[in-house]
């Protein structure tokens, strides 16, 4: 018999779906403990205990897989995963994982868009999606839309692009795109990676267009920051928008892989009509594995904080909107999808851009918390699914935009530029007038996107924040 105790950084009543600090302890009462288990045996037992208890598909884990001859923790976890699970994973450095969830990473500050160009070759180029404020790239004057062709004197290809780009010291060679061709422009910049804390509010402004003042926020991660400083910054932006009478808002989350769900709820609560908040309406619902679902319902009822999250009061910041516009891309995941799903029952939501990634599950970060810790590994298993208040959830294909815009990474515009096709489409929806000569339509750009291993790590995580203590349900 054992129990699970999950403790978070701070006590909040809302789920934060993409990563968290979570302390989990397992204690098994045995007549005679087996003497001297190896660290690897401890890790394997720990993985089994977690995956047969809190895992969303725990009931489907084959009992015949344990005990096991598999000694590699990653391979053992992989053997337990449901075919429907694309996101549960394990790492060998818990603290490094925690830092990444809080936007504290070793980075040069460039958010890269890797793609094969020209198509049907193995040549890779990197477009700069954006640059983190205060980073080495920012100090060097690198800006959104620049194009990198070589790193450390080596042309990029499908085999070397990730290892070269994520080197701690890089010399980047740039090119210009003109009339379908890339031409070296002579620019070279050397960057040394530093530990940075990225501000997820990359850009914000009020766009004045056709007599309408439109609030615009380019938002790259649902992070609260140290002592909630990024939430405080968001509040100041919303307060400014409110004081200036903003009635239209564009949230640009094209490069946002997710983050804390309580931040998603806070932003949504700053947008939604005030009567929705006053009516104690549900932002999102949570579905657990059958055992835990029944446990929460029986112990706390259908309105348990573990089953629903309500919109919160945000006095002084709420814009009381009836419409909102979300710009999305294939990296928009998790909390980015949650905020759209949570708002749709209450507002007119227009999604513009590309399909989102398709992640509608929540996970916990589960380390070993014995004193002293027996190992440094951490599990990130999916433990629940989220839906809208009316039960809607997305599919593996993501949320489909109302207006499809296939972004051309070779012609990116600065954040807030009204000639950006996605922003232009939003402004046309708002005013009926397009800022560009012809409204951008779904014309696929001839490219092959490549995976980004660092961003994939962020997209596979979900957070919650609060306190949770549950007795093991299979005693």
Image (spheres, rainbow, N blue to C red):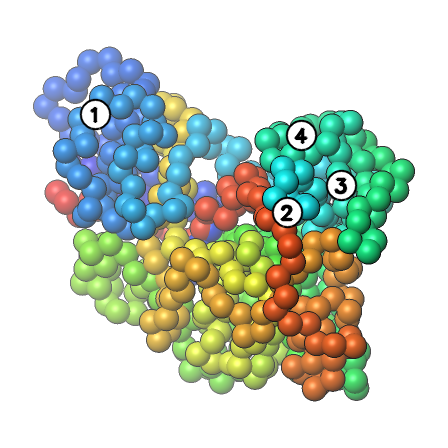
Q: Secondary structure at mark 2?
A: loop
Tell me which label, 3 or 2, sits earlier in the chain.
Answer: 2
Residue 377 x %, y %? 41, 29
Q: Which mark is on residue 447?
A: none
Residues under labels 3 and 1: Cα distance? Answer: 47 Å
Q: Earlier in the sequence, mark 3 or mark 1?
A: 1
How would you rate the neighbour count of disc 4 (Cα within 10 Å): few for under 14, some for 14-19, many for 20 or more?
many
How far apart, in angstroms, are the residues tagged by discs 3 and 2? Answer: 17 Å
Whichever of labels 4 and 1 marks the residue nearer the N terminus, that label is 1
Choose between 386 and 394: the one closer to the eye: 394
Please identify, in this view, whether the residue under mark 4 or under mark 1 is nearer the observer: 4
Which labelled disc corresponds to residue 148?
A: 3
Q: Residue at x 18, y 48 (%)?
A: 59
The residue at 34%/38% (across/down) is 24
Instruction: Evaluate if marks 4 and 3 touch, with contact meaning CB atoms under 8 Å apart.
Output: no
Name the disc covering residue 164, or none: 4
At mark 3, the secondary structure is strand
Residue 358 on image: x %, y %: 45, 58
Q: Residues within 10 Å of mark 1 (few under 14, many from 20)?
A: few
Query: For mark 2, does the 10 Å Cα neighbourhood hold few (<14), some (14 to 19), or many (20 or more) residues?
Result: some
> In which quadrant of the rendered image does the C terminus lie?
top left
Closer to the camera in the image, 465 or 182: 182
Q: Which residue is mark 2?
A: 119
Q: Is residue 49 left or right of residue 177?
A: left
Q: Position of residue 169 (x, y in %)?
A: 73, 27
Q: Secondary structure at mark 1?
A: loop
Residue position marked by numbered label 1 in the rendering: 68
User: CB of mark 4 within 8 Å of CB of mark 1?
Assistant: no
């Amino acid at each position: 018999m054992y129990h699970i105790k999950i403790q978070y950084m701070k006590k909040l009543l809302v789920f934060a779906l993409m990563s968290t600090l979570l302390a989990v302890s397992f204690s098994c009462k045995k007549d005679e403990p087996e003497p001297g288990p190896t660290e690897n045996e401890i890790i394997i037992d720990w993985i089994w205990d977690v995956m047969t208890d809190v895992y969303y598909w725990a009931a489907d884990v084959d009992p015949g897989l344990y005990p096991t001859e598999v000694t590699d923790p990653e391979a053992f976890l992989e053997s337990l995963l449901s075919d429907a699970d694309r996101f549960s994973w394990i790492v060998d450095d818990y603290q490094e994982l925690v830092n990444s969830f809080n936007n504290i990473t070793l980075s040069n500050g460039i958010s890269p868009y890797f793609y094969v160009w020209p198509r049907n070759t193995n040549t890779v180029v990197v477009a700069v999606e954006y640059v983190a404020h205060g980073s080495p790239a920012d100090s060097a004057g690198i800006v959104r839309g620049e194009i990198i062709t070589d790193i450390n004197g080596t042309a990029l290809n499908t085999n070397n692009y990730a290892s070269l780009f994520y080197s701690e010291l890089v010399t980047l060679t740039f090119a210009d795109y003109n009339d379908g061709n890339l031409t070296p422009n002579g620019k070279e910049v050397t960057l040394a990676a530093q530990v940075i804390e990225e501000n997820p509010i990359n850009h914000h402004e009020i766009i004045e267009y056709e007599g309408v003042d439109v609030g615009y926020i380019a938002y790259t991660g649902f992070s609260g920051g140290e002592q909630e400083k990024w939430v405080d910054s968001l509040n100041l932006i919303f307060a400014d928008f409110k004081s200036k009478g903003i009635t239209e808002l564009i949230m640009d989350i094209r490069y946002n892989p997710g983050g804390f769900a309580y931040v998603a709820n806070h932003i949504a609560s700053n947008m939604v009509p005030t009567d929705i908040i006053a009516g104690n309406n549900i932002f999102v619902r949570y579905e657990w594995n059958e055992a835990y679902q029944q446990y929460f319902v029986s112990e706390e009822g259908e309105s348990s904080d573990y089953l629903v999250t309500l919109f919160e009061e945000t006095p002084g910041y709420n814009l009381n909107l009836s419409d909102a516009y979300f710009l999305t891309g294939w990296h928009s995941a998790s909390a980015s999808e949650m905020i759209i799903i949570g708002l749709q029952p209450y507002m007119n939501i227009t999604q513009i851009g590309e399909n989102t990634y398709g992640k509608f599950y929540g996970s916990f970060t589960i380390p070993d918390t014995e004193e002293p810790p027996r190992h440094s590994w951490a599990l990130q298993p999916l433990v629940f699914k989220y839906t809208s208040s009316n039960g809607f959830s997305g599919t593996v294909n993501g949320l489909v935009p109302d207006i499809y815009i296939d972004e051309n990474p070779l012609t990116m515009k600065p954040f807030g530029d009204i000639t950006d096709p996605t922003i232009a489409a939003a402004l046309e929806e708002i005013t009926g007038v397009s800022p560009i000569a012809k409204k951008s339509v779904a014309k696929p750009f001839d490219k092959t996107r490549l995976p980004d291993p660092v961003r994939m790590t962020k997209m596979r995580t979900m957070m919650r924040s609060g306190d949770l203590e549950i007795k093991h349900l299979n005693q």
